[in-house]
Amino acid sequence: MPSNGTRGRRKLGVLFDVDGTLVDSSYLHTVAWWQAFRHSGLDVPMASIHRSVGMGGDKLVDRLLPPGRDKSLDSSIMAAHGAVFSTFWPALRAFDGARDLLAQCYESGFAVALASSAREEDLAALRSTLHADSYIHAATSANDAKESKPDPDILVAALEAAGVQAEDVVYVGDAVWDVYAAAKLGIPTIGLACGGTAGTQLVEAGAVEVYENPRELLANLRDSAIGRLAGRS
């Protein structure tokens, strides 16, 4: 790939989801949500929760609980999820190849942004796990978006933070909600199956291609959508 990562004077960029994409946390979030629901006396199957992980917490709760419920419990459920998930911070591990993938994109001249809707404190723990801050130009948290995924607000914030345009980036994510959010801005998404969503589901949602994990994407970077984006420069 070219080393400048630019097309004319316009920067090219790669946006990354973090939970389930770069860090092996999807199932920890599933357990945290399950415990949060149980704390409020609600029994929600883990399989249903996992299929919703990647949405914003408010939308996840809305999707999994009956519409006629007492919504005054929602904030306490989300707070409980955050409290439980924080106990898992020491167990967080970056996927193999995640740091190297970020480094390669950075060294190829791309603007690299973490388009995360995690809480600020969770994002700090995730970034600490990645050990890749020197390869990241910008990062977003839940505070940067009015509406959560699958709405595209967090991606808009990441574009602004990185100084790039939607037509000049590729997004890398692990959930169908990532794909849906990016599609609303016309951004192609590379799906990674390491978060637990099947590759076929990611393709059906609109992902332009799917790899098993960051290491496989890195090994095929030149022929991937990221490589094709660089080829436009």
Image (cartoon, rainbow, N blue to C red):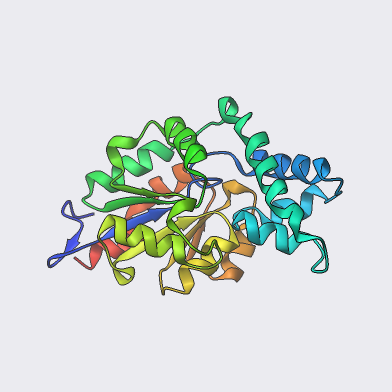
Q: Quadrant of the C terminus?
A: bottom left
Image mark count:
0
Percent x, y of residue 142:
49, 52
Q: Give the vertical position of 51 relative to 91 (above or below).
A: below
Residue 205 screen position, x and y as percent: 59, 69
- For the residue pair 61 and 93, the one nearer the viewer reads as 61
| Coordinates of residue 222 in the picture (x, y in percent) | 32, 55
Q: Does the rendering let one see residue 121?
A: yes
Picture residue at 46% right of the left edge, 60% below the top: 145
Q: Is 77 on the left-hand or right-hand side of 118?
A: right
Residue farthest to the front, as pictured: 72
* Residue 223 appears in the figure: no
Q: Is residue 152 above or below residue 31?
A: below
**Residue 58: which quarter of the image?**
bottom right
Q: Is residue 3 left or right of residue 205?
A: left
* Horizontal arrangement in the rendering, residue 103 relative to residue 49 (left or right): left
Identify whether 163 is placed above or below 114: below
Q: Which residue reaches farthest top? A: 90
Task: Name the quarter where the N terminus is drawn.
Answer: bottom left
Residue name at image x 19 percent, y 55 percent: 2
User: Is 41 in front, or is 214?
Assistant: 41
Residue under the point 49% across and 63% down: 146
Quadrant of res 199: bottom right
Residue visible at 25% across and 53% down in the picture: 110
Residue 154 in the image: x percent, y percent?
A: 45, 60
